[in-house]
Amino acid sequence: MISDGESLFLAGVPPLFAKADVVEGWIPFRRVFDVVAHGKRHVMMGATQIDRHGNQNISAIGDFAQPKRQLLGSRGAPGNTVNNRTSYWVPKHSPRVFVEHVDVVTGVGPKRAREAGAAAYNDIHRIVTNLGVFDVGGPDDTVRLLSVHPGVSVEGDPGSERLRGRCVGFRGGRRRGRDHPRALPRRAHADPRDARPARPPRQGGARVIAQVLKTPLTELTGVRHPVVQTGMGWVAGPRLVSGTANAGGLGILASATMTIAQLEAAIIEVKGRTDAPFGVNLRADAADAPARCDLLISYGVKVASFALAPKPGLIAKLKEHDIVVIPSVGLPKHAVKVASWGADAVMIRGGEGGGHTGSVPTSLLLPTVLDAVDIPVIAAGGYYDGRGLAAALAYSAAGIGMGTRFLLTADSAVPEAVKRLYLEHDLNGTVVTDKVDGMPHRMLRTALVEEIEESSRLKRLTPTFRRTLEFKRDSGMSWRELAVDGRAMRKAQGRSLAQMTLAANTPTMLKAGLVDGDTGAGVLAAGQVVGVLDDLPTCEELIERIVLGAAAALRSAGSALV
């Protein structure tokens, strides 16, 4: 629909420059704004200027009181941007368009809309130029690069501060290398004499929807939506955690597979990508757990989650520094214990969940834990959409946790070929086995897993010893430290000596599959929900549709009341 003239209703979306196959109706200009005022639409506008916060200018160039050049005027731009999803088309990407501050704000960006307090809705969806596609996905609602068009590349020396070629973007920033997340695109074979310094914003998720569900989880942690991305080893790294956090959920960084130095680097990277709250998952039985907690305290991490019950002293120390403590539990009695020690909330994971799991389904574990404690309970195991979140909230849960669903997103660093392998499996595509590390472990049913299931204990000893050596090398631990850590694990988890000999299998085999992409040598943890997943959305898209779907489901359920 063209709001500056007569328009047509089309049956489909024709290709560029092609005529529509079916014209369903005609709108004279006098009726255009009747249509504008009613119903949801996606607006596409041009932009003379766009600043780093997604504010658009089509009004004037220069001082507002005495502009150097008069343009179209504000027209309907302000109303479009606070009432409709809006995208911008920039036919020539240049520093004249992408500026530090627009001269006049006509189209409102998300940060300005939020600060004004008058608009509950603002969705600057995409900025499409002749070089690439952008959104307002950086921390503090700044513009970020999503993709470049064919024939366009981001050029520069990796790791250097010198950006070669025609770098077009926000003026006033320093130059960065090609692989730096802040680098901007250039047209291939562009004239290097046109090089300019540029400073595009940090990566991160966009502020898409306002809070629509208020729960004890959102109140406790400060996140916008009651959705938790769980701390999956080798999967929940800075990219996925920051993507979740910027989309309004609670991202949890997995630290069990990291050294302390790697954990510190990961926390710094997440904080560089987002200003939103996030958490770190810790092994409560690890010998260096207190030192890792000190890292969380020193960097102001909002949430500490634990795979096992942390000691009362550790809980007290974290709470003294306003860190929210959320242990995972598998039985009501475990929830009662950690609640008595001062835990702020607990997460339960039913047998449907991936990784180390129990036999009790979420539908039974959740209500029994809710009946046992009076602290917030987060439900995990079998969740993937808005209906699941609505069901959990109907049980009185504070939110949901998801692992496999977040693993299968565009923001996950798992190799694309491995993601496609996940998506090929159906509801019978997982198996629970204790042959990998001696504990029940739900994983994707692959040829390797079936081979392990059929092998004898003696046949598994040689590869187990090899993986123990590999784990020792990757972790940087001495044999003495491995022994101390093993004793602590045996005491905390009640593992037998035979189970302890297999313990190193899990991190090394998961790394082979989830990081290296070698499914012939690695295992792939997976929840049963893998059988109903068929796409790889961004964290932003996933959380938005889950939250809006849950709100719709709750409204629909409410209509059944008499």
Image (cartoon, rainbow, N blue to C red):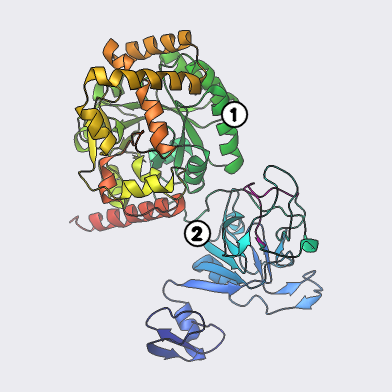
Residue 524: where, in percent of width, then height? 34, 37
Q: Looking at the image, is 454 positioned above or below residue 7? A: above
Q: Which residues are magenta?
A: 174-186
Residue 22, which numbered label? none
**In front of the other: 306 or 494:** 494
Q: Main secondary structure of the magenta part?
A: loop
Crowdedness near tag 1: few (<14), some (14–19) or many (≥20) residues, C-alpha within 10 Å: few
Q: Amino acid at mark 1?
A: Tyr
Task: Indicate the position of residue 481 as horizontal and vertical percent values.
Answer: 47, 11
Q: Identify the residue under disc 1.
A: 299
Residue 419: image x %, image y %?
Answer: 38, 47
Residue under circle 2? 120
Q: Quadrant of the C terminus?
A: bottom left
Count of numbered circles in the view: 2
- Residue 487 figure quarter: top left
Q: Tell me if I can see residue 257 in this picture.
A: yes
Nearer to us of marks 1 and 2 is 1
Q: Is residue 232 visible?
A: no
**Disc 1, SS:** helix
Q: Nearer the viewer, residue 56 or 384?
A: 384
Residue at point 53%, 65% (across, down): 82
Kindly state the secondary structure of the residue where label 2 is placed.
Answer: loop
Question: Which amino acid is tagged 2?
Answer: Ala
Q: Nearer the viewer, residue 152 or 48?
A: 152
Residue 407 on image: x %, y %: 39, 43
- In magenta segment, residue 231: no
